[in-house]
């Protein structure tokens, strides 16, 4: 499950970067970034709890 969250976060960050630099999609891009950041934070928290 942790690897899945990490993969989703990476994909969302890449999509956000492409959208931020290539297109102006407005709020949707920033929502994707927030979701990606939440996924990364969850991954870090779960990683620390597992150790």
Image (cartoon, grey):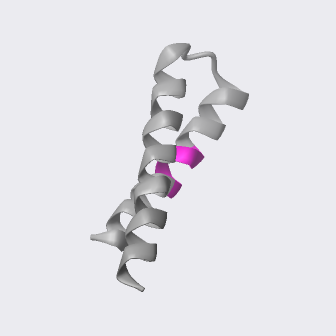
Q: Residue at x 55, y 17 (%)?
A: 25
Look at the magenta stretch and give its main secondary structure.
helix
Q: How many marks?
A: 0
Asked if residue 20 lies left or right of residue 41, the reply is right
For this orientation, the residue located farthest to the right is 21
Q: Which quadrant, please, contains the C terminus?
A: bottom left
Quadrant of res 42:
bottom left
Q: Residue 17: image x %, image y %? A: 65, 39
| Residue stretch in magenta | 10-14
Residue 19 versus residue 13 in the image, above or below = above
Query: Does 43 lie within the magenta span?
Result: no
- In percent of the image, x 54 and y 41: which residue is there? 15
Of residues 38 and 30, the one drawn nearer to the viewer in this rendering = 38
Identify the residue shown where x is 48% and y is 65%.
44
- Residue found at the very far left of the displayed protein: 1
Q: Position of residue 29 (x, y in %)?
A: 53, 26
Q: Quadrant of the N terminus?
A: bottom left
Q: State whether residue 32 is above or below residue 36.
A: above
Residue 23: image location, x then y, percent:
64, 22
For the point 49% across and 35% down, the residue is 34
Q: Using the image as rendered, state which of residue 22 and residue 35 is in the foreground.
A: 35
Query: Is 37 located above or below residue 3 in the figure?
Result: above
Q: Answer above or below: position of 11 versus 28.
A: below
Percent of width and height locating residue 43 = 43, 64
Q: Residue furthest bottom?
A: 51
In this picture, residue 18 sits left or right of residue 25 = right
């Amino acid at each position: 499950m942790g690897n899945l969250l990490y993969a989703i976060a990476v994909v969302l960050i890449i999509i956000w970067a492409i959208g931020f630099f290539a297109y102006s999609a407005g709020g949707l891009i920033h929502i994707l970034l927030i979701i990606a950041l939440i996924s990364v934070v969850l991954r870090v928290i779960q990683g620390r709890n597992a150790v």
